[in-house]
Image (tube, helix red, strand yellow):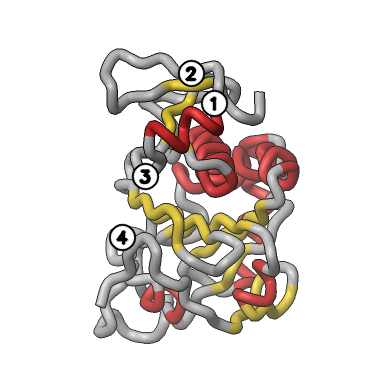
Amino acid sequence: MSLKIGDTSPDFEIDTTEGRIKFHDWVGDGWAVIFSHPKDFTPVCTTELGYMAGLKPEFEKRNCKVIGLSIDPVDNHMKWAKDIEAATGHAPNYPLIGDSELKVAKLFGMLPADAGNSSEGRTPVDNATVRSVFMIGPDKGIKLMLTYPMSTGRNFDEILRVLDSMQLTAEHQVATPVNWQRGDDVIIAPAVSNEEAEKKYPDGWGGPLPYIRTVPDPKR
């Protein structure tokens, strides 16, 4: 069966550019984002890996680890890192999984079970579906799933924005509206009755409709 938001993330043990890891142990009690690539030395992915390296401190501030995956051996990743730094000014500063046997790609449903068991001879087109982002919560549940085409670079500022929303809404009974940014007003969750909301927000709330009850960001 394909994975869904709310499912427990697959666990696995695998080699990375920073040594062997057991995924759930590596995630620990924080958050994690895993983003995948169809092949080393591909142009769009090269720009993504470098940008993510520059953005990594922002994820760390939010207790979120970063890990990449590519359908190639770890040795290739080490060579690719030099190109990434030359192109973007940032070498990967997070582990990059060597998924040369396609195990993790299959576990996450990015490749079918009959895709074979070796990266050798495969092209980026063969692995086109290995262009996903998964956000994993402290409970090891999958909180976000996004898959991009090979020709479209991912927006990791958006992934960071979603992480801010998920962490806020996990702590408070609120939801975030369209294009929300940190500090913007939020919406009282529908599960909170008006009576409960009056106790929690004695100054009341705004909003264009009775069921869109807006209040200030609780962390503002």
* Front of the two marks 2 and 3: 2
* Front of the two marks 2 and 4: 2
Report how far apart the C-alphas of labels 2 and 3 lie in the structure: 17 Å
Report how far apart the C-alphas of labels 1 and 2 lie in the structure: 5 Å
SS for dot 3: loop
SS for dot 2: loop
Report how far apart the C-alphas of labels 3 and 4 lie in the structure: 36 Å
Quadrant where the image shows the C terminus:
top right
Report how far apart the C-alphas of labels 2 and 4 lie in the structure: 47 Å
- In primary-sequence order, the first of circles 2 and 4 is 4
- In primary-sequence order, the first of circles 2 and 3 is 3
Residue depicted at 33% across the width and 71% down the height: 109
With respect to residue 132, does 167 lie above or below?
A: above
Report how far apart the C-alphas of labels 3 and 1 lie in the structure: 15 Å
Query: Which residue lies under the disc numbered 3?
Result: 191
Query: Which residue lies under the disc numbered 1?
Result: 201
- In primary-sequence order, the first of circles 3 and 4 is 4
Amino acid at pointer 1: Tyr
Query: Which residue lies under the disc numbered 2?
Result: 204
Residue depicted at 70% across the width and 56% down the height: 94
Q: Are marks 1 and 2 in contact (CB under 8 Å)?
A: yes
- When asked about the image quadrant of residue 32, the answer is bottom right
Residue depicted at 33% across the width and 47% down the height: 148
Query: Which residue lies under the disc numbered 4?
Result: 129
